[in-house]
Amino acid sequence: MTPQNESKAIFRIWRGDATQGAFQDYTTEISSGMVVLDAVHKIQAEQANDLAVRWNCKAGKCGSCSAEINGSPKLMCMTRLNTLPLDQPVTVEPMHTFPRIKDLVTDVSWNYRVKKEIKKFQPRKPDAADGTWRMQQSDVDRVQEFRKCIECFLCQDVCHVLRDHHMHDQFIGPRFLVYAAALEMNPIDSADRIAELRDSCGIGLCNITKCCTKVCPEEIKITDNAIIPLKERVVDRFYDPLTRLFKMFG
Amino acid sequence: MSAIDVPLQKNRFGQTRRKDRWWIEPLFVFLGYLIFTVYANYALLANNYYELPGTQYLSPMYSPLLFRYAPGWWPAILPYSAAALILWAPLGFRITCYYYRGAYYKAVWLDPPSCTVGEPRKSYWGERSFPLILQNVHRYFLYLAIVFIFILSYDAWRGLWFDGPNGPGTQFGIGLGSIILILNPIFLGLYTFGCHSLRHLIGGRKDVISSSAVRQSCYNCVSYLNRRHMKWAWISMFYVGFVDLYIRLCAKGIWHDWRIF
Ligand code: SF4
Ligand code: SF4
Ligand code: FES
Ligand code: FES
C-alpha cells in the first residue's frame, strides 16, 4: 500500500534495555515521502518521549541509524515507507549481533576494538624527493570502492558467523574484511596482513553467502570485490604449492 | 580478536521477522541443482546415445571420449561409463566455484537458509578447516576447465563435419546440432573466464595492475564477466545438459537433427 497524503500505520517497536524487553505497537500518522526514521521520531515526539534511537545525518551517510526493519538490516533514514507493506505492523528492532543498550540503540564498540587489532597502513618509501607518491587512478579504483563504507555495521549484523554463531572472538566480520582489503590492495601500503587474515581475522569462516553484500547501503560488493580477492591471496600464500614454487624460483 | 562478553540472542531454525517470501530463492536454487544432478546422473549412468550416427556430434558430458569401452584397469564391480572418466573435472570446477559454494551452502546446507533466517545447526566451521578447506583447490580445477573449453571448441568444429560419399566426417555442413555445439564452449567460456580465481591470477593479486596494459585489459575483461558470473553459471550448466539431451533424443530417433545445409 502506498501511503496517500495522510494515513495511519502501525509500528511495532522494540522497547527494552540490555537484558529484557518486548515489542510495543504505536499507531501514527504517516504521509508520503516519509522514511522509517521520520515515523520513529514522530512516535518519540508524540507518544514515547523516552524512546532511545541513534541517528545523526538523516541522509544515509553517518551510519548511525542502523536497525532491523521487518527483519532486514537497514538504515532507518533510507527506508521509505512506500517500500514496506503498511497493511501489517512494521517491526523495528535493534541489531541482533551487538549487545543492546536501550530500545533501538546497540553497543557497537566491539567493532572499534576489532579495527584497532588490524595492522595499520604502512606507506612505502615516497616515490618523489618531496615525500609524495605516484599512483594510477585505475589502481586505486578498487580501494575507493571500499572507502565508501560509512561503518553502519549492517553487514556485521547480517553476517551469520556473527549473528547466529557469535564467533566475534574469531571473525572480524565483513566490514573489517573490507577495511583489510582497502589496506592490502592499496598500492602504497607495504604491510603484510595475509597471515593474520587467515588466523586471527578468521577469513576462512566466511562462507561467501553474500548477505553482507545485499544489505550494504553503499552498495559495496563486499563478497566479490573484497572477501573473495583476499581469500585468493590467502590461497596464494598457504594453499597453493605451485604458486609457492614459482615464488621460490621467481 | 576481541570477544563480546554479554550473551546475545540465539535464533531457532527458520526463525526470522522477515515478511517477504525469503524461501523462494533458495528453493529455486535447490530445485535447479536437483534437476541438474538427477539428469547428469542419468546421462552418466546411461553410457549410451552420446553420439549421433551420420554426424560427428559428441555430447559434452562424454567429451573427450577417452575409452569407449571399459579399459582393463576399470574395477569390474563398478558399472562403466565413459563419462565417469572426465566428468569429475567440470563437476569439481563447479562444486568449488565461489558462486556455487555460496549458493549451495544456503540452499542445500541451510548455512543460513537465507539472510537473517535462523540456522538448523549450532556448530559452524566455515571454510577454515577440513573438509571445506579443500575448496581452496578451485584454481587447479580452473586450469582443467580452460583445457575443456579448447576440447569442446574442437568438438564444435567436428560438429560441422558429416558423413559423406568420401567417408565418415568428410562433408562440411551445418545442422541444428552444429549450432548447438558451437554455443556450448561460448557459454562455458563466459562462465569460466569470469572465475574469481582467474580474476585474481590475471591481475587481482597485484596491488598495481596498471603497470602492464595487457594485464589491465585482461583484468577488466575478467572483472566484467565476473559481475555476471552467477548468470553464466546457470546458463552454461543447463546448456550442457540440454546439448546432451539434444544428442540423446536425436540418437534415439525421438528428435531429428535439422540439417541446414
Ligand atoms: S559473505 Fe561472508 S562475511 Fe558476508 S555475510 Fe556471508 S559469511 Fe558473512
Ligand atoms: S561495508 Fe557497507 S554495510 Fe558494511 S559497514 Fe560499510 S557501509 Fe555498512
Ligand atoms: S541517520 Fe545517518 S545514516 Fe541514517
Ligand atoms: S569462481 Fe566460479 S568458476 Fe571460479
Image (cartoon, helix red, strand yellow):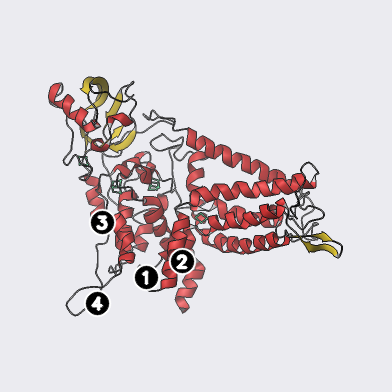
> Quarter holding the C terminus of chain A?
bottom left
State the image quarter where residue A6 is shown.
Answer: top left
The answer as to whether the residues below labels 1 and 4 share one chain is no
The answer as to whether the residues below labels 4 and 2 share one chain is no
Inspect this view and state whether residue A92 appears: yes
Which of pointers 4 and 3 indicates the residue nearer the eye?
4
Q: CA distance from mark 1 to mark 3?
A: 31 Å
Q: CA distance from mark 3 to mark 2?
A: 35 Å
Q: Amino acid at mark 3?
A: Glu
Query: Which chain hosts label 2?
Result: B
State the image quarter where residue A130 is shown.
Answer: bottom left
**Of the numbered discs in the image, which one, if any, rests on residue B210?**
1
Q: Amino acid at mark 4?
A: Asp
Indicate whether B138 appears above or below B250: below
Pointer 4 residue = A127
Q: Secondary structure at mark 2?
A: helix
Q: CA distance from mark 4 to mark 3?
A: 29 Å
